[in-house]
Image (tube, rainbow, N blue to C red):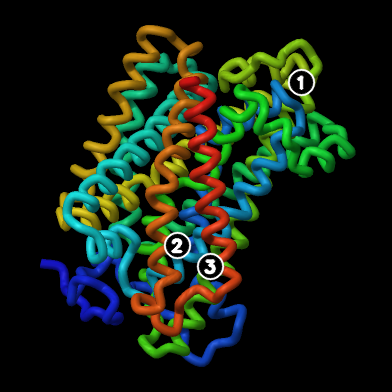
Amino acid sequence: MPPEIPSSRAGWRLPSSRLSLPEVHGSITIPAGAGFWRKLFAFAGPGYLVAVGYMDPGNWATDLAGGARYGYTLLSVIMLSNLMAILLQALAARLGIASGRDLAQACRDSFSRPTTIVLWVLCEIAIAACDLAEVIGAAIALNLLFGLPLTWGVVLTALDVILVLFLQHRGFRYVEALVIGLILAIAGSFALEIWFSRPELAGVAAGFIPRVAILRDHEMLYIAIGILGATVMPHNLYLHSSIVQTRKYGDTVEDKREAIRFASIDSAVALMSALFINAAILIMAAAVFHGSGHEAVAAIGDAYKLLSPLLGTTMASVIFAIALLCSGQNATLTGTLAGQIVMEGFINLRLRPWLRRLITRLIAIIPAIIVVAWYGERGTGPLLILSQVILSLQLPFAVVPLVMFTSDRTKMGPFVNPGWVKVLAWAVAVIIAVLNGWLLYLTFA
């Protein structure tokens, strides 16, 4: 049985809560009396595990479609989504450190059993949608690089459970090191892609200015909300509130306040790398495809085939596919942890990690195989974008509880959100809910 920890706040309904990810909880020591940079290095890592979910193959599909169809216009959506993500992930870290609970445990401790079950099911759907994007992205990359049929590539992705289990057995720092290495590979790849594509700098700068036209155009809004769903991912809030507790910080108010500060810096810096990569994908698509007669490009495979002839170098396509493979594999590393956290946190059910991972991956593999077998490669692009819209529709059900908990003084004590953070956080929650409602209205009306 996992050990139990005492409740640190009287505002929680349950008197005690199990440790989140007990096998790695408090496993990374924070050096006592160390300077700022040494402590920052000790806390660095969880933010990058969160950031990989913000640059997975689902982002690629929405960013490619947005850049090809609308040029640099949707860069503003990527920027605003990333700023929302920085705020929400900082709140997730605050909740985990201050309360000793991840977001799933906090929901179970605060809401009724039926409400908890509904939130759990919605979160599982979001994880399955995210996993679907990773499965398809990795399968496409294997097909582009090695000619492996898409169906076989989809099946082969189930084997990544071995890598996840091996790294977690070696220690949590190994997982973080691999993730950071893959992020650097992706960032380097897209730095080269931007160099090859030579974007219009004035257009890029103008693209970061928000425009009302995005709300009026149904198709543009659909992709914009897909970008939002691909950027601010609901299961990342559960993940972050748990993995910040892998650090062995003290239990005093001062120690926890310091831990919150360093965890917030870690996630903000990591998410800026996600901003660069997502913006780079859209910029490349806008520079290469928009205005060149290829505005309909949305499928990753089509982008791969067109990059070399349009840019005049075969390296452009190869680098693109390598970055896609790194992105797909990187995102799978966090899928296992997120699935374990929500299942244990919401319904207090603990499965063996390999079984949990296999179940999640099979749920994603089944629709992927059906689409690939029926529609072929052409069906993967719309399916990727749809998966990101599903994520966005589920997002309010994670964001609202997070903002509620961190704004409640009876639950958070001295770590409650300051007034200005409450205003910003609720504004973000309302914006997300309104945009999703507007999308549903346009879709069905």
Q: Residue at x 50, y 73 (%)?
A: 417
Tell me if residue 439 comes above or below residue 103 in the rendering. Answer: above
Given the image, on which type of amino acid does mark 1 rest?
His
Residue 165 visible here: yes
Which structural element holds mark 3? helix
Q: Which residue is mark 2?
A: 403
Residue 88 at what x, y percent from top left?
Answer: 51, 59
Q: Quadrant of the N terminus?
A: bottom left
Which structural element holds mark 2? helix
Q: CA distance from mark 3 to mark 2?
A: 8 Å
Q: Residue at x 45, y 79 (%)?
A: 415
Crowd band around label 1 with a 10 angstrom C-alpha radius: few (<14), some (14–19), many (20+): many
Q: Is residue 125 left or right of residue 196?
A: left
Residue 107 at what x, y percent from top left?
Answer: 28, 60
Tell me if residue 43 comes above or below residue 385 in the rendering. Answer: below
- Compare marks 2 and 1 and give the one earlier in the sequence: 1
Residue 42 visible here: no
- Compare marks 3 and 2 and give the one earlier in the sequence: 2
Judging depth in this view, the residue of 178 and 207 nearest the camera is: 207
- Compare marks 3 and 1 and give the one earlier in the sequence: 1
Q: Residue at x 70, y 21 (%)?
A: 69
Judging depth in this view, the residue of 75 and 324 nearest the camera is: 75
Which structural element holds mark 1? loop
Q: Which residue is mark 3?
A: 422
Q: Which residue is mark 1?
A: 290
Q: CA distance from mark 3 to mark 1?
A: 40 Å
